[in-house]
Image: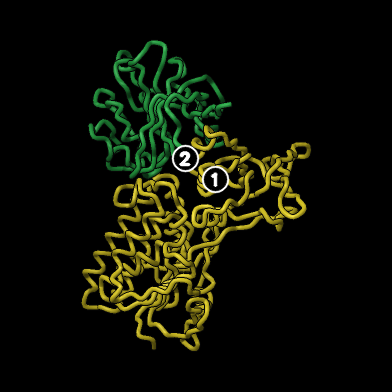
Amino acid sequence: MSDYQVLIVGGGPAGLSAAAVLSKYRVKSLLVDEGVKLGGQLIKQTHKFFGSQEHWAGVRGITIPEKIVEQIDRNYIDIWTNSTAIGIYPREDRVYIRKNQKELIGMSFPYILIATGASENMILFEGNDLPGVFGAGAVQTLMNQFGVFPGKRVLMVGAGNIGLIVSYQLLQAGVKVVKLIEASPNIGGYLVHASKIVRMGVPIQTSSTILKAEGKDRVEKATICKLDENWNPIPGTEEELKVDTVCLAVGLSASYRLALQAGCETTFVKELGGEVVKRDRKQKTSVDKVYIAGDAACIEEASSAMVEGRIAGLAIAQNIFPEKAQELEEAIEKEEAALNKLREGPFGNRIKQGIEKLLGEVNGR
Amino acid sequence: MKDEIRKRGYLLEEDLRPEMIPQGERLTSAPFALIECVENIPCNPCETSCPKNAITIGENITDLPRIDFSLCTGCGICLVKCPGLAIFIADLSQSSDFALISIPWEFLPLPQVGSKIKGIDRAGKVVCDGEIAKVRKMPKDKTHIVTARVPRKYFNQVRHFQIVEEE
């Protein structure tokens, strides 16, 4: 056994929030993050958050990580950045971590929180392997974290919040967003995000998809077309766009391979985006010592990731301090109420329904 | 109506809530905030930031904001605080020919007072000419307020400015 009670994999909003809670209860924990800078996706979110005051409304995502880190008592929490948890081996009761991407260390932990977030989906089209085809997250990393232009003329694919927001951030960097296309008939993201970029000169075209990207050493042009009500390309509607960058914002998939290695069960819940790791209301998976929170549990928002991280931290503390069970249960219920409030409205309702289904299944066992 | 907005991505004048624009004398007596928020998302910085308590959302933060124009002074704080950049200030009190329209601006460089602009509508189309009248830099918030003078009849159309490059 290592010195640590808990391993937190991932230093984004969920992982950092769990660390803050665990340090408050003086639970010695190790947080590992593969990034060079703590904060997960928050470090690229230059826009202002929505929600209520208690949930960082009006605050820019980039300023949030340091605020959470301030709450982490470093006497109890060790943080290794630039370090990847590469595998969980339940039979040996070991987790292997590449510390500073050099030293391979195997350790045991009584509790593990998987807060590894999500990764970009890919769509198939001719030329999708050309330099200049990026996931939206990669474009944000290049621009917002490292100050590097991805290109100068972009076709944005996807009208969810990520596609809409990254288009705006591209405009702020001085990049031309030639068009934003969306395969479904409707814009999936917030209307205010869409309205903003339309008045700033980015046309949005729904029921459209990309057929191919072409170019010699990188993207030089892309061909898009309209889709009929059966999602089939309509012949004759092809349009060639002179772009050097194709940015794909076509959805995220939870990164939970570590959970699978640990033996956690999954189940299919349509409302939560597909296959998700089964977990109870305290973010505990089917493996008693493994917890999951944030986008790794289900694609949602930074604000809900923070609350889920806190719930997981409190639940783990409940196991370690049975004498504080009541106090911690009340704290968990407060966080659950906050989560419910965050999930109000048409966007949150789908998640609520999905989680009800998921918990129903978990409790039915 | 809502279906079309979800395909288009922007609002037409007919999509705006009629109660969100002042009536009668109030329209021309002093500046006022135009809150173009039509979707139920959990969000309330406009309500919490208004120093005159002119904006109400209430307990359920997914409700749409309502504004009391008798309390609104058009100060612009809500314009700065709105995460959706969906609030604008219009001032029709200065002249019968011109309106001053203030928009949120999160670009660098900031425009220069006196610069010529094209007034852009919600669809991204040029509707008129104008001129930058005022620039208020908000160094802490980083959502700056840029005000332009445009022909008064376009006050409910102009929602963005394109700076005309000097030759």
Q: Chain of mark 1?
A: A
B90 or B115: nearer the viewer: B115
Q: In the image, is A63 to the left or to the right of A237?
A: left
Q: Quadrant of the C terminus of chain A?
A: bottom left
Q: Residue A191: x and y, percent?
A: 48, 38
Residue A188 in view: no
Q: Nearer the viewer, mark 2 or mark 1?
A: 2
Residue bearing the label numbered 2:
B108
Q: In the image, is B55 to the left or to the right of A100?
A: left
Q: Are marks 2 and 1 on the same chain?
A: no
Compared with A23, A219 (above or below) is above
Image quadrant of residue B124? Answer: top right
A212 or A284: nearer the viewer: A212
Label 2 amino acid? Leu
Residue bearing the label numbered 1:
A170
Specify few, some or many for label 2: CA neighbours under 10 Å numbering under 14, 14-19, or 20 or more: few
Q: Colour of chain A?
A: yellow
Q: Residue at x 40, y 60 (%)?
A: A305
B45 or B59: nearer the viewer: B45
State the CA–CA distance, disc 2 to disc 1. 13 Å
Q: Residue at x 47, y 85 (%)?
A: A106
Image quadrant of residue A170? Answer: top right
Q: Residue at x 44, y 85 (%)?
A: A107
Q: Colour of chain B?
A: green
Residue A66 in view: yes
Compared with A281, B60 (above or below) is above
Q: Residue B162: x and y, percent?
A: 52, 29
Q: Chain of mark 2?
A: B
Query: Is the C-beta separation of discs 2 and 1 under 8 Å?
Result: no
Label 1 amino acid? Leu
